[in-house]
Amino acid sequence: MTVTADHTVMAEPRPCERCSKVSLLWVVGRCADCIAELGLQDDRTEYDAWKADVQAEYGRK
């Protein structure tokens, strides 16, 4: 599958930075599956780093 950026569409497939799978749901470089795995890990180091990236990108609530 070729991934191209088209700014006229609502959603476009992008590769996950963590697992390299192509996904439509993508938040700060991670696909939904990887975000779920991060949240379920006993070691929260990687999740906390991703969460900090989300807050830097979108701001705090």
Image (cartoon, grey):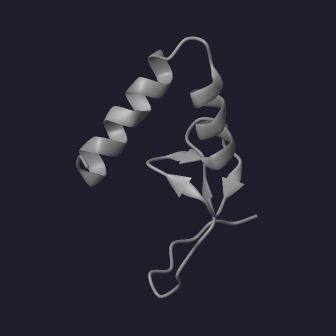
Residue most extreme to the right: 1
Please tell me which residue lies in front, 49 or 2: 49
Quadrant of image for the N terminus: bottom right
Q: Is residue 60 above or below residue 44?
A: below
Q: Position of residue 49 (x, y in %)?
A: 39, 26
Q: Is residue 47 above or below residue 16?
A: above
Image quarter for residue 55?
top left
Q: Position of residue 60 (x, y in %)?
A: 23, 46
| Residue beneath the point at 56% across and 75% down | 11
Q: Position of residue 40 (x, y in %)?
A: 64, 25
| Residue beneath the point at 69% across and 66% down | 2
Q: Relative to 1, is 26 on the left or the right?
A: left
Q: Position of residue 23 (x, y in %)?
A: 67, 58
Please tell me which residue lies in front, 48 or 13: 48
Tally of numbered tags: 0
| Residue beneath the point at 50% across and 80% down | 6
Residue most extreme to the front: 61
Q: Is residue 10 above or below residue 40?
A: below
Please tell me which residue lies in front, 60 or 50: 60
Residue most extreme to the bottom: 8
Q: Relative to 27, is 37 on the left or the right?
A: right
Image quarter for residue 56?
top left
